[in-house]
Amino acid sequence: MTSGIFDAYLRRLGMPDPGAPSTEGLFALQRTHLERVPYENVDIQLGRPPGIGPELSARRFAAGRGGYCFHLNGGFAALLDHLGYDVTRHVGGVYEETDAAQDVNGNHLALTVRVDGHAYFVDVGLGDGPHEPLPLREGAYEQGGFSYRLEPLTGPLEGWSYHNPGSPFPRMNFRSAAAGMDEFEAEHLRLSTAEDSSFVRTLALLRRDAESIDVMRGRILTRIDPAKGPSDRELTTREEFYEALSTVFGRELDDLTPADRTVLWDRVCQAHEAWLAAQQG
């Protein structure tokens, strides 16, 4: 990957010169990544899922797009490598149950980074995860009113379990062993093309800042603020919808043709009507 791609990526983050590896630099990079590069599945909804090669992901981020965990953490790991950080990729898995088994289902890419003699759990691919890295040791942590916990996995697998009680996926397990990007290809294919995949069924965008989380699922835009609770707004017009994609989530729209915009809006509306019917039923 050429340095020019990384230069453009860093400009997207607003950090053209992040300096030598440091704890402060790592924290700043994670914060700005979460604030400027959204978790999103627009292209999957349009039936053209992007690959998860780190160079492709870095190019997409530089151009104003986002992705989901394999793109976001894959591209971020490549950037950290380029900047001289000691970063390791891990096979992980997210779960809807807080008491999920001590296994790893492979549907998440997690990262750890060693810097200044300490190890950190680093993740820009959860959407609603920590705003800053967490020390890779057992304990409870709070950031901006959100609470998290890390604990070692028990049982035959060596690894860690991350807990986020307020999330739709409150638990993520990951193995300690290092992984290569090729280990995520099969699961990416399933998640981005299978009819029963949530990424295929529902448009989702998330953006994290220091004190809140913005979430769009279909036509419902939610702001989650621990101090005030969640607030929902239904996006009733096509104009509102695309304005939210651009302004709330920072997702550039110049890659979407007029036909793309019609297809995406129609698809989101159909899913929204089906969701409303299910709520009433």
Image (cartoon, rainbow, N blue to C red):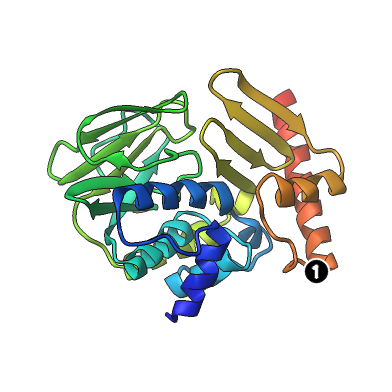
Q: Residues within 10 Å of mark 1 (few under 14, many from 20)?
A: few
Q: Residue at x 49, y 33 (%)?
A: 168
Q: Residue at x 53, y 57 (%)?
A: 13
Q: Tell which residue pokes out farthest to the bottom in this image.
A: 2
The residue at which mark 1 appears reads as 257
Q: Secondary structure at mark 1?
A: loop
Position of 162 with respect to 221 (left or right) is: left
Q: Tell which residue pokes out farthest to the top in this image.
A: 228
Residue 256 place in picture, x, y as percent = 75, 66
Q: Quadrant of residue 155?
A: top left
Of the pair 165 and 154, the residue shown nearer to us: 165
Residue 213 place in picture, x, y as percent = 57, 35
Residue 94 place in picture, x, y as percent = 39, 43
Quarter of the image with the C terminus is top right
Position of 1 with respect to 252 (left or right) is: left
Residue 166 place in picture, x, y as percent = 46, 26
Position of 30 with respect to 92 (left or right) is: right
Of the pair 37 and 194, the residue shown nearer to us: 37
Quarter of the image with the N terminus is bottom left
Residue 39 seen anywhere in this rendered image of the structure: no
Q: Is residue 97 above or below residue 255?
A: above
Q: Residue at x 29, y 61 (%)?
A: 85
Q: Quadrant of residue 200?
A: bottom right
- Amino acid found under the numbered disc labelled 1: Thr
Of the pair 236 and 147, the residue shown nearer to us: 147
